Image (cartoon, coloured by chain):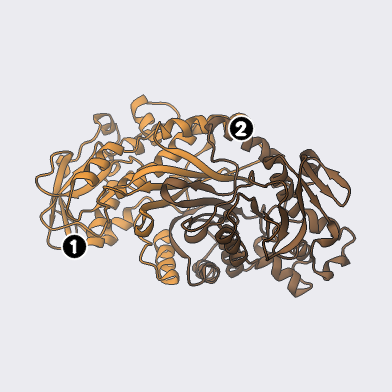
Chain colours: A brown, B orange
């Protein structure tokens, strides 16, 4: 809750139209830009993730933000703050993981390195927008269908299983993959306004945000949401699917004739999320939200 | 020392030509980008700087990096990590200071806010390069003169005086000003290759870095370096001028006929810094350097 309160203060303080989406779309420069941070003991625990995985995941999280805007991620800067007890092997492995996440097309071009009491990673990602239709969470149109790129709940299930358990679930938590092609295809082919987000803070958070920012009702059929059958080992697996977070899948509202993605519902007149008959206002979702403040994820 | 060791590991890991300068010059996008972080109890102490000043200074430090590249800072993203005991007044005042530093022409367009044990601020700055000759620390040319934009040593003297003492010195530490016009004039009028840096890590660090990256000798006359007479209250005031850091002045190598700035020396054949007859190798300077690791500045 505190995060949302602070964001509203920041919006007031800056009186800026840019604050709100995960990425800022800087039309005059033809770029989108986003920044995200990972803090030790808030977003990860050092004994539960390798330096390689941490480098990989930090980068992927930011690539995912750019994807979700419809942009093509091309450059990153990385700011690392490291405690005294972190050695050069940590830095080497972190950047090996970062490199792997970047693949052939994305380059790390700068940043800084400082001391600190805990590990702190902040990454800025820059994407090109040429030839792409850039999304906004406020752009969902009544009549569009709602699609997702893949399964939800696996990452939060994997987190619960750490350090040992189903390898696929754990991997989806420690080594998520940004849905680069899925998002690119949408931004390169959809011509009308549309909403797109990644599901970093959970599927319901993304749905509710799109609904409330676009002032529409998202009518969702829970049974259409894909999930890995392995997660039903948890009694509250439905909550993992809906609120779990960190799957880094894409959710988008696209024209009815768009030919990719898994359809989970439709954009209708109204406000909020209707989940198989159960209504969720903005406040209902926030109450259940993944709370960044005051505890491990 | 550890910071330089880590940067060399990162350079190897990434095999990137961009890492090294404070800003990365992304020619295809027509922008320069930089990222810098401020960590509580490493770069500042909460009881010695107001939230307003912290917001102001964090932004200025990043504007200064873009200036030093020759770019025109236009956009910033701000990532804030805040402990539980930080309240909404802190956030309000921080952004009031940030806004003041931005002035009319620079916009904060994004970022994120997360929890953490200590305050952590990471800022990414983006500058336009159109109509400007972008500098590199490797571009100093034999025959150029070396100019600075203003006094050195005031910020580190102010830091020593905190919380009370000469108001001007303390202000130069808590509320530094990026040398926007000074740097812009150089990048808009100098046609040949030139080196420019801000003196965030100290004047000698900047001089030594330019010398070693450009493979030249910087011949400096100490008596030409401007400083505030108030700092001579410290026995080691000459060290404050040379190694103090955080003055955020500009040092540049420019053609002999360039008509602004305070001339402190000349670029000659050789390697390193010759300071009024005393020779400083890269290692000599590093030994005396402001060490980011393991202590409040």
Q: Is residue B158 visible?
A: yes
Quarter of the image with the N terminus of chain A in it: top right
Q: Quadrant of residue B13?
A: bottom left
User: Please, is residue B102 above or below residue A174 in the view?
Assistant: above
Q: Position of residue B149 (x, y in %)?
A: 23, 39
Question: Helix, strand or loop at disc 1?
Answer: loop
Callout 2 touching callout 1 (CB < 8 Å): no
User: Please, is residue B90 above or below residue A19 in the view?
Assistant: above
User: For the view shown, which residue lies furthest in the front direction?
Assistant: A257
Q: Is residue A117 visible?
A: no
Q: Position of residue B260 (x, y in %)?
A: 16, 38
Q: Which residue is mark 1?
A: B271
User: Please, is residue A131 above or below residue B177 in the view?
Assistant: below
The chain to which mark 2 is attached is A
**For this view, does A272 lie left or right of residue B81?**
right
**Of the numbered discs in the image, which one, if any, rests on residue A76?**
none
Q: Which residue is mark 2?
A: A9
Answer few, some or many: residues within 10 Å of disc 1's Cα (few below 14, many 20 plus, some between 14 and 19).
many
Question: Helix, strand or loop at disc 2?
Answer: helix
User: For the view shown, which residue lies furthest in the bottom direction?
Assistant: A167
Q: Position of residue B11 (x, y in %)?
A: 40, 67
Q: Mark 2, mark 1: which one is toward the viewer?
A: 2
Task: Determine if marks 2 and 1 fall on one subunit.
Answer: no
Q: What is the distance, in whole Å, between disc 2 and disc 1 at their CAs?
A: 51 Å
Answer few, some or many: residues within 10 Å of disc 2's Cα (few below 14, many 20 plus, some between 14 and 19).
some
Q: Nearer the viewer, residue B294 or A258?
A: A258
Q: Position of residue B7 (x, y in %)?
A: 41, 63
**For this view, does B276 lie left or right of residue B171?**
left
For the point 85% across and 61% down, the residue is: A223
The chain to which mark 1 is attached is B
**For this view, does B30 lie left or right of residue A95?**
left
**For this view, does B269 lie left or right of residue A281?**
left
């Amino acid at each position: 809750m505190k995060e949302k309160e602070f964001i509203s203060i920041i919006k007031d303080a800056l009186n800026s139209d840019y604050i709100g989406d995960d990425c800022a779309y800087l039309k005059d420069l033809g770029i989108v830009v986003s920044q995200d941070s990972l803090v030790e003991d808030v977003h990860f625990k050092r004994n539960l993730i390798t330096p390689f995985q941490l480098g990989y995941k930090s980068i992927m999280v930011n690539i995912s933000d750019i994807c979700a805007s419809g942009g093509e991620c091309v450059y990153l800067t990385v700011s690392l703050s490291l405690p005294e007890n972190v050695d050069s092997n940590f830095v080497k492995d972190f950047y090996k993981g970062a490199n792997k996440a970047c693949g052939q097309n994305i380059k790390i071009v700068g940043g800084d390195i400082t001391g600190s009491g805990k590990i702190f990673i902040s990454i800025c990602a820059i994407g090109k927008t040429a030839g792409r239709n850039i999304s906004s969470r406020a752009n969902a149109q009544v009549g569009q269908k709602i699609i997702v790129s893949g399964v939800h709940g696996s990452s939060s299930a994997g987190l619960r299983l750490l350090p040992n358990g189903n390898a696929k679930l754990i991997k989806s938590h420690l080594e998520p993959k940004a849905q680069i092609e899925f998002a690119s295809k949408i931004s390169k082919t959809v011509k009308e306004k549309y909403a797109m987000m990644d599901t970093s803070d959970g599927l319901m958070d993304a749905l509710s945000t799109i609904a409330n920012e676009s002032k529409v009702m998202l009518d969702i059929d829970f049974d259409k949401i894909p999930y890995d059958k392995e997660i039903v080992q948890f009694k509250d697996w439905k909550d993992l699917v809906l609120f779990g977070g960190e799957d880094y899948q894409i959710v988008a509202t696209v024209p009815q004739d768009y030919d990719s993605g898994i359809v989970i519902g439709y954009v209708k007149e109204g406000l909020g999320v209707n989940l198989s008959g159960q209504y969720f206002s903005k406040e209902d979702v926030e109450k259940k939200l993944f709370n960044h403040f005051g505890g491990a994820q």
